[in-house]
Amino acid sequence: MLPAVRLISEAAEVAARRHKSMLRKGRDNEPYANHLAEVANFLAIATNGADAELVAAGWLHDTLEDTETTTEELSARFSDRVASLVVECTDDVSLPKAEQRKRQIVDAPNKSADAKLIKIADKISNIGARIRSNPTAEQRADLIEYTDWAVQVVAGCRGGNAYLDETFDDVVRRARASL
């Protein structure tokens, strides 16, 4: 296995390159890699830097869903654990979005403890990106819908890390106060 710093650095490079042409939802023209960096950073803070594989999986959590990356490639390049966590956090994109969202709510309590941490970090990042001063009606509706859904997903993920639970509660408070 790669040393911790190399594992995280290589995961960051792969994630950034594979998502290079994508832009983030919620923030105008922000590179998608910023979302991946934010998720990985939340996980690094939550574990005080003690779990390089978890942080690497945070960087890579959307690669199977959004790119041509394969599970086998992640396993060979990083580790079986990193690949397994990414698989666990990947939606079945062949399903309609409403069904994907419903499955996230239903499946959340059955995820591994580490996949739950990634899910919470992902929702914190995504809600935060949707908070705007003076939102349009469409932005307001998106924030309400996404936040209400994320609260349901995270309900099945709570209890594994106080920092992430508190940070999620804070971003939900900020989102609702911005409306």
Image: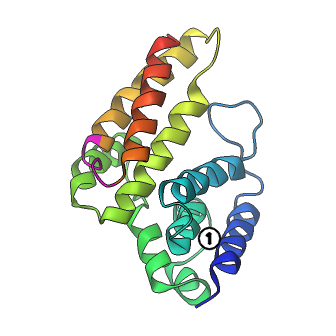
Q: Main secondary structure of the magenta part?
A: loop
Q: Quadrant of residue 25?
A: top right
Q: Kindly identify the residue that appears in the image at 22 percent across and 54 percent down.
A: 109
Find out whether residue 103 is within the magenta segment. no
Residue 94 is at least partly visible in this image: no
Query: Which residue in the structure is indicated by mark 1?
Result: 68
Answer above or below: position of 86 versus 174: below
Answer above or below: position of 144 versus 4: above
* Residue 28 image position (x, y, % from top left): 74, 30
Left or right of 103 in this view: 59: right
Answer above or below: position of 63 versus 157: below
Q: Which residues are magenta?
A: 155-160
Answer above or below: position of 166 versus 35: above
Instruction: Tell me the kind of residue under disc 1.
Output: Glu
- Assign the N terminus to one quadrant of the image: bottom right
Q: Kindly identify the residue that appears in the image at 28 percent across and 43 percent down.
A: 102
User: Counting other residues with Cα less than 10 Å from the Cα at mark 1, is it few (<14), some (14-19), or many (20 or more)?
Assistant: few
Q: Kindly identify the residue that appears in the image at 40 percent across and 37 percent down.
A: 166
* Residue 37 image position (x, y, % from top left): 66, 54
Please give the count of numbered marks on the rendered protein: 1
* Residue 62 image position (x, y, % from top left): 55, 59
